[in-house]
Amino acid sequence: MPEFHKKMGEKPRDVEEAETIPEDKIYKLILKMPEDPALREKLEKKLEEYEGRTAEREKAKKEQPPIATYKEVILRFLLKDGAVKMSDLLKDLSEIHGNVDRTSFDNAAKVIEAYVKGGKVSGGTGLK
């Protein structure tokens, strides 16, 4: 069982408290699913968009950039479990895949953090 699921009883930091976290502190971030149903729907659509991109790359036999994979994984766990603790997810990914590109992982976490807060991200397609 992933470490994250064992620690769900911990009181997570609210996303509102997270603000912009420096890359070396991203492992302390815990994202929680927003209560706003409209925002949740936008996040579900964003996951569908990420999954569609992954399918297109697989079909074209193109390599998936690490940041794209990490954004998809973070968002999938957030929607499924209601919260994601970055330190536990990073540990699980490291155990499964060995090497994790920390810069890409940290940037992916920041993007999903911004989406959860309903904010905009420079570049990309944003929430629709």
Image (cartoon, grey):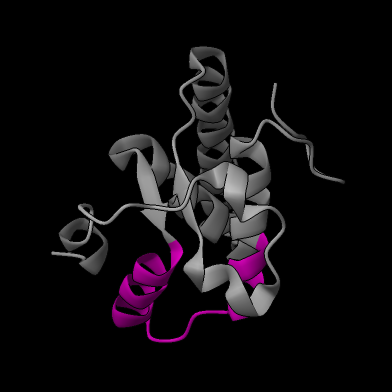
Judge whether residue 83 can be spotted in this image: yes
Q: Is residue 35 above or below residue 112?
A: above
Is residue 95 located in the magenta-colored stretch of the structure?
yes
Q: Main secondary structure of the magenta part?
A: helix
Is residue 89 located in the magenta-colored stretch of the structure?
yes
* Nearest the eye: 43 or 21: 21
x, y percent for residue 29: 51, 61
| Direction top: furthest residue | 38
x, y percent for residue 57: 59, 51
Q: Is residue 65 above or below residue 24?
A: above
Q: For the magenta stretch, what is the residue range?
A: 86-107
Apparent side of residue 15 relative to residue 107 in the rendered image (left or right): left
Total tally of numbered discs in the picture? 0
Q: Is residue 99 above or below residue 48?
A: below
Residue at x-position 49% and y-position 69%? 28
Residue at x-position 46% and y-position 52%? 13
Q: Quadrant of the C terminus?
A: top right
Q: Is residue 101 above or below residue 38?
A: below
Q: Quadrant of residue 52?
A: top right
Residue at x-position 67% and y-position 74%? 23
x, y percent for residue 69: 53, 58
